[in-house]
Image: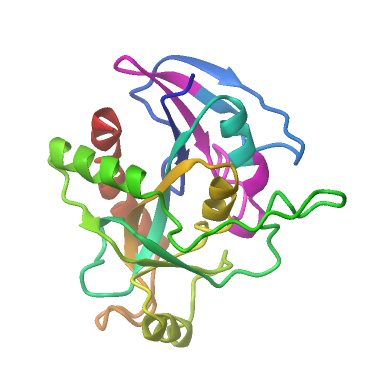
């Protein structure tokens, strides 16, 4: 039994605190996952970890095999999944190094295989995604962050874009009008696939930078800035996981 599965995003490729780690190479009906699943213990609990982009960050957001990733964790016995996502901040409360737990989602991606039903001869399933994140899981993460002493923004709308390029100022302005607080490239179809398998799923968003046009003092967004902010935000993740 897996007590918790974690999907790591940009900047989170291993959980160093995991003890007694074993490696599983999982074959799925949908091909290979992004990489091996590392299973270990955090305290007395059994944790599975999968790097979404691969442990060498070689898989672009639109090329991630989301179906294989979610299926692999489910097949190993995971029923609770915490996705860690690197994002850009759009609204004032979502500045760099903020850690947020969104409660809504808008999908701007295209061409991604977005359902386990998307196969010949498979019965089509229409899942309710009115609330894209599990309420129970969100409550648990909020409580864990409070116990860990980590400030967490509760709620917000995650807008998922295609990537791997960053967005234009006009695109971010449109997303702001749509009500988005955060912008990332990996929130979908992962959330929908988790719902199809009835997983308790939540997204822990680490704000790496202001989205285009949201920081009036910035000329351009640099990768140096992004990775510095991600390193600082990622440092609190193990504390939250230990409490969760």
Residue 222 place in picture, x, y as percent: 39, 66
Q: Is residue 4 left or right of residue 116?
A: left
Q: Is residue 197 left or right of residue 96?
A: right
Q: Is residue 137 above or below residue 48?
A: below
Snapshot colouring: rainbow
Residue 208 place in picture, x, y as percent: 34, 59
At 57% from the left edge and 66% from the top edge, which residue is drawn? Answer: 163
* Closer-to-camera residue (22/127): 127
At 54% from the left edge and 37% from the top edge, which residue is drawn? Answer: 55
Q: Is residue 207 above or below residue 181?
A: above
Residue 116 place in picture, x, y as percent: 70, 49
The residue lying furthest to the right in this view is 121
Q: Which range of residues does the magenta coloring cover?
A: 39-68
Q: Is residue 237 visible?
A: yes
Q: Is residue 140 above or below residue 27?
A: below
Q: Is residue 46 magenta?
A: yes
The residue lying furthest to the top in this view is 20
Q: Is residue 64 above or below residue 178?
A: above
* Closer-to-camera residue (232/61): 61
- Residue 105: image quadrant is bottom left
Residue 5 place in picture, x, y as percent: 46, 32
Q: Is residue 235 magenta?
A: no
Q: Is residue 34 visible?
A: no
At 60% from the left edge and 48% from the top edge, which residue is drawn? Answer: 196
Q: Quadrant of the C terminus?
A: top left
């Amino acid at each position: 039994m897996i007590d918790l599965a974690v999907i790591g995003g940009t900047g989170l490729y291993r959980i160093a605190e995991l003890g007694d780690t074993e490696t599983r190479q999982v074959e799925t009906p949908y091909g290979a996952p992004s990489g091996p699943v590392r299973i270990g213990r955090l305290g007395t609990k059994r944790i599975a970890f999968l790097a979404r982009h691969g442990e060498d960050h070689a898989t672009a957001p639109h090329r991630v095999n989301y179906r294989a990733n979610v299926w692999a964790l489910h097949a190993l016995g995971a029923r609770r999944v915490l996705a860690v996502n690197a994002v850009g901040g759009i609204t004032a409360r979502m500045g760099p190094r903020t850690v947020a737990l969104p409660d809504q989602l808008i999908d701007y991606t295209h061409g991604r295989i977005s359902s386990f039903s998307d196969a010949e001869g498979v019965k089509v399933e229409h899942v309710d995604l009115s609330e894209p994140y599990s309420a129970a899981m969100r409550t648990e993460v909020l409580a864990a962050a409070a116990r860990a002493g980590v400030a967490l923004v509760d709620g917000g709308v995650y807008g998922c874009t295609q990537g791997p390029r960053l967005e234009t100022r006009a695109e971010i302005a449109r997303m702001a009008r749509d009500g988005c607080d955060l912008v990332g490239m990996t929130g979908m179809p992962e959330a929908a696939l988790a719902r199809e398998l009835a997983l308790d799923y939540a997204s822990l968003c680490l704000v790496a930078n202001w989205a285009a046009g949201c920081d009036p003092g910035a000329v351009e967004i640099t990768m140096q800035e992004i990775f510095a902010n991600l390193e600082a935000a990622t440092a609190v993740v193990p504390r939250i996981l230990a409490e969760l």
